Each structure stands twice: as C-alpha cells, then as structure tokens.
Image (cartoon, grey):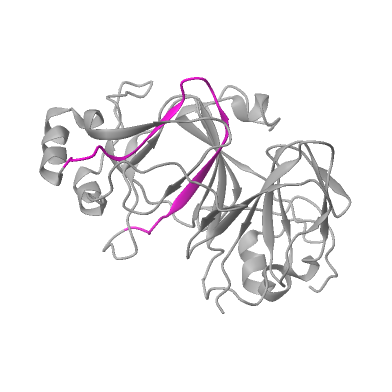
C-alpha cells in the first residue's frame, strides 16, 4: 500500500495491570483505563510476539506495527535503519503508585534473555519521590551477595531524589528500581527480560510473593556501577546511545519533525502540539513517518514541550 502519508500515525495503547500500578494514567493523562484495575504500564508503541501496537485511525488503520515494519519499512520508517526483525524500540508510560522491584536487565553478551537498555523521563514526580540505581560507593560483589542472603539488599542501593522534568539512563547491567509517586515515560530496547533480585518483601493479594531471579541477576549486575547521577542534558539531547536517541523540545515556533528522511516518534509533555492537522495533549504519542519528515510541528499554546525519539542512522 502506497500513500502520501501526511497525518501522524497514532497507535492504540495497551494497558498492563501491575501490582504496583495505580490510576494516574487516567487522572493526569486522560487515558481510558479499564475500571477497577491497577494499571502500571501503558505500552504506547510495541512490536513483540505477545504484544502488538495497532494503528488507531487513518489510511493504515488496523495495521499492526510489525506489519508496517515488515512491509512498509522504507516509506514509514526510512532507509538508514538497523536490520532488525522487529521495530527496535518499546515506548511506555509508567505509573508507580508503589515502588517497583529491585531488578536488572541483561546485556548483549548475556547467554540468556534479551538485552535491555532504557531511559526514563519523569513527567510527574510527587513530593518525596525517588529512584534506586546502582550501588553505594565502596560496595563490592561479596557485600551484595551477603546482603541478599540476609535480607538487607536495600541498604546497599544508591538512592536519588526525583523532580518533575528529570531524566535518567539505565544501561543494561545497572541495578535499579522506580520508587513510588513517579509517573514517567520509558524508552527502551525492544525487550521484556527482567531479573528481580528483591521485591521489598511484598505479597500479592493472594498472599504469594513474586518470583525472584537472584542467580541470573548476580550474573547480569555491573558491580562497578556506583552512585550514578541524573542525566545532564546536552542542549536538547537527553540520551544518544546505539539503541535510541531522545531529545526534549521546547516548542516555541513551528519546527520540522526531522531533518533527514526518517521517522520520529513524539510524546507531548506539556501544553499541546499540532501536527498534520491533529492536536496532541500531554501523554499522547504520535509518529511522523519518513515520507512526511518535513511535517511541521506547531505549539498549541504557550509552554508546549515534547520528547522526540528516533533511531541513530546506520550510516
């Protein structure tokens, strides 16, 4: 199917119930959540065997992300792309009503699981919100293993206070947990492998505890990673790594989606953004396809800001 695509691509979100989730995706971002469920994650763009984004409206309505990536790659996503079987980015919004488990993701050299590097942008952090990331300075692997055995794991983890507008990078191998009170955008490699090492002695409603993968976690943790800091932006760039690039735009005047023939995925953070005849408000994602890269984004009022997510060019 060929089309002179002008309208942005908008996908249906997939809502995930989580033990630690809440309802702020509805109250803050206006998402139509299923009733009486703790929704922890909204998967906004995903191409996995067990989960597929589907186009909500327009000429590609009803098509899955995987169909578009497989059959319309050059037209929608561009030419300078990695030779991946599936779209390489998974974009989410998370509502941490309670803190998440202390966990780690494997790296590319792991013998099991899918490698995952990710970044977080904190769209709203309640007073006292924090994250847990890396080890406290001076902690050795033997100290950590002893703490796991004695139930004192949390005492060895570095803590950082979080404010709205902060961002944080989580390379594979970094021990981490999102604290309660955080509403965040997560951009990650297309992976769903997580090794839990500690879950705060939490129990599910039926009294059971979630499984831990301590042995796998110990193999994946980077024990040289101590006391990491929040991202310090370089101009508009928050993250530039081999797996994705994330910028924060303060949209004061009209601006082209991309300077090269490549897609760009956006999420409105504050104010409103107009693109291709549509308006987007905070929490809404939209993709400008490669063949419409010159499409201009317009501020929908004062104080309009957004994240721009792309893949690095392969050449």
Which residue is outermost to the right? 277
Image quadrant in which the C terminus is located: bottom right
From the viewer's perspective, tell me whether residue 188 is left or right of residue 9: left
- Left/right placement of residue 171 relative to residue 17 reads left
Front residue of this view, candidates 49 and 180: 180
Q: Position of residue 93 (x, y in %)?
A: 57, 40
Residue depicted at x 47% and y 65%: 242
Residue 233 percent location from the top left of the image: 54, 49
- Asked if the magenta segment contains residue 131, the reply would be yes
Which stretch appears magenta? Answer: 113-139
The N terminus - image quarter: bottom right
Where does residue 253 sit, x and y in percent of width and height?
83, 49
Residue depicted at x 37% and y 36%: 177
Q: Nearer the viewer, residue 168 or 39?
A: 168
Picture coordinates of residue 218 (x, y %)? Answer: 20, 48
Does 24 sit left or right of 128 as displayed?
right
84 over 232 or under it: above or below: below
The mark tally for this picture is: 0
In this rendering, the answer to whether 56 lies above or below 154 is below
Residue at horizontal 21 percent and vertical 53 percent from the top: 219
Name the residue furthest front: 235
Vertical placement of residue 92 versus 26, above or below = below
Q: Nearer the viewer, residue 305 or 288?
A: 305
Q: Is residue 97 magenta?
A: no
């Amino acid at each position: 199917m060929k089309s002179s695509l002008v309208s942005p691509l908008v996908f249906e979100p997939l809502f995930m119930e989580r033990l630690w989730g809440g309802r702020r995706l509805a109250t803050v971002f206006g998402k139509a959540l299923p009733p009486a469920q703790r929704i922890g994650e909204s998967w906004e763009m995903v191409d996995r065997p067990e989960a597929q984004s589907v186009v909500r409206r327009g000429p590609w309505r009803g098509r899955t992300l995987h169909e578009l990536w497989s059959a319309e790659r050059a037209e929608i996503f561009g030419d300078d792309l990695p030779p991946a079987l599936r779209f390489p980015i998974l974009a989410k919004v998370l509502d941490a009503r309670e803190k998440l488990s202390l966990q780690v993701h494997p790296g590319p050299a792991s013998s099991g699981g899918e490698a995952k590097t990710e970044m977080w942008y904190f769209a709203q952090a309640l007073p006292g919100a924090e994250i847990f990331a890396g080890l406290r300075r001076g902690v050795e692997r033997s100290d950590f293993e002893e703490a796991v055995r004695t139930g004192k794991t949390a005492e060895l983890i570095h803590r950082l206070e979080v404010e709205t507008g902060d961002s944080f990078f989580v390379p594979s191998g970094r021990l981490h947990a999102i604290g309660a009170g955080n509403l965040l955008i997560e951009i990650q490699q297309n992976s769903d492998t997580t090794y839990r090492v500690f879950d705060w002695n939490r129990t599910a409603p039926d009294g059971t505890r979630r499984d831990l993968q301590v042995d796998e976690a110990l193999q994946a943790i980077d024990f040289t990673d101590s006391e990491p800091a929040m991202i310090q932006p370089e101009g508009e760039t928050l993250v530039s790594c081999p797996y994705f690039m994330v910028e924060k735009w303060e949209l004061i005047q009209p601006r082209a989606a991309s300077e090269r023939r490549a897609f760009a995925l956006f999420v409105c953070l504050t104010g409103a953004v107009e693109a291709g005849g549509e308006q987007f408000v905070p929490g809404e994602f939209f993709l400008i396809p490669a063949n419409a890269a010159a499409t201009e984004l317009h501020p929908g009022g004062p104080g309009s800001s957004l994240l721009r997510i792309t893949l690095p060019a392969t050449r």
